[in-house]
Amino acid sequence: MKVLGYHINLGATDGRVIAPNTRVQRTLARTVLTAGRDCGLLAFRAADTHLHILAACCRELAGRWLRSLSTKLRVRLKLPNGLSSAHFEPVADQRHLVNAFRYVLRQDERHGTQHAPLAEASNLPDLLGMRLIGGYTAGSVARLLPRIRAEELVARLDLTVGQLTAAAISEDAYEQLEDAAAATLGLPRLLGRSSEVVAARVAAVAVVGDALPTARLTRLLGSTARTIRRLKGREADPRLVEAVARQLRLRTVRTQARRDDALVLQP
């Protein structure tokens, strides 16, 4: 029987939480996404002790990719006992493919975990234009899962499409500018002078525009006034500018939601 792909499930051999914090979640995402294009990656998400992956490829390719991926994850996530043997479930038809896609992305809900509120240990940010390294998965989903809509995906982050694409960015969210820019590339921090780090800094400055004084930008990006002026003079990647803006809008909405919750809880 010819299948449409495989739903793959694996976990740490010793049963530990695979990606317990933002730094590790971003490392996991970069590791999966940088190698996933060739195996038809559609979705992945780590929640609690397991990693779920949906790939539109044959069993031989999926197995070869998982062996390589498991080795990289063991080293980069510092898993001393490695990962358990993966379980491969064949995806029999289109309905199964849609259900598996939704199942993978709602792993946090199924496990009741709260340590990944921005879904960074998944490709949800890539599907929503908030991260660039896995942007190819958005194209694959559009082609193979045409009934999946943006409204459904943003709802997984408790957002609406309008909030993600057009909401005003709050003062509190600007305080997270460096982290938002790093998130667009799946990096823990914007450290060093690599081309992608510089591009993210240029995009961050472009998003701010004239909304903040240079002195505040230097603090937020850990830079100097001279460097900020130089970054302002460079041409920004529009895709990266939009990704940073969407990361900041997500933080704007989440900050407001926390404030609303606090008001409700006050006696």
Image: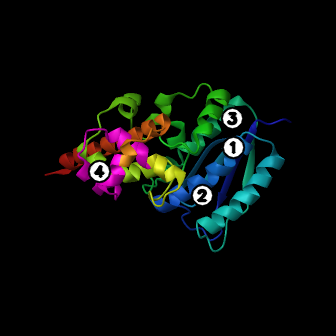
Q: Position of residue 37 (x, y in %)?
A: 69, 43
Scheme by which the image is coloured: rainbow
Separation of marks 1 and 3 at Cα, in angstroms: 21 Å
Residue 32 in the figure: left or right of residue 6: left
Q: Is residue 227 above or below residue 3?
A: below
Q: Residue at x 29, y 50 (%)?
A: 217
Q: Name which residue type carries label 2.
A: His
User: Where does the magenta region start and end?
Assistant: 201-229
Q: Which residue is mark 4?
A: 217
Q: Mark 2 or mark 1: which comes first in sequence?
A: 1
Q: Nearer the viewer, mark 4 or mark 1?
A: 4
Q: Main secondary structure of the magenta part?
A: helix
Residue 225 in the figure: left or right of residue 76: left
Q: Position of residue 51 (x, y in %)?
A: 61, 55
Q: Residue at x 67, y 65 (%)?
A: 83
Q: Name which residue type carries label 4.
A: Leu
Separation of marks 2 and 1 at Cα, in angstroms: 21 Å
Q: Position of residue 9 (x, y in %)?
A: 67, 53
Q: Which residue is mark 2?
A: 50
Q: Name which residue type carries label 1.
A: Arg
Q: Residue at x 32, y 57 (%)?
A: 224
Q: Is residue 55 above or below residue 178?
A: above
Q: What kind of element bears circle 3?
A: helix
Q: Name which residue type carries label 3.
A: His
> Residues at badges 1 and 3 in contact (C-beta under 8 Å)?
no
- Neighbor class of circle 2 (other Cα within 10 Å; few <14, some 14-19, many 20+) is many
- Neighbor class of circle 1 (other Cα within 10 Å; few <14, some 14-19, many 20+) is some
Q: What kind of element bears circle 1?
A: helix
**Is 202 contained in the magenta span?**
yes
Residue 226 in the figure: left or right of residue 143: left
Separation of marks 4 and 1 at Cα, in angstroms: 36 Å
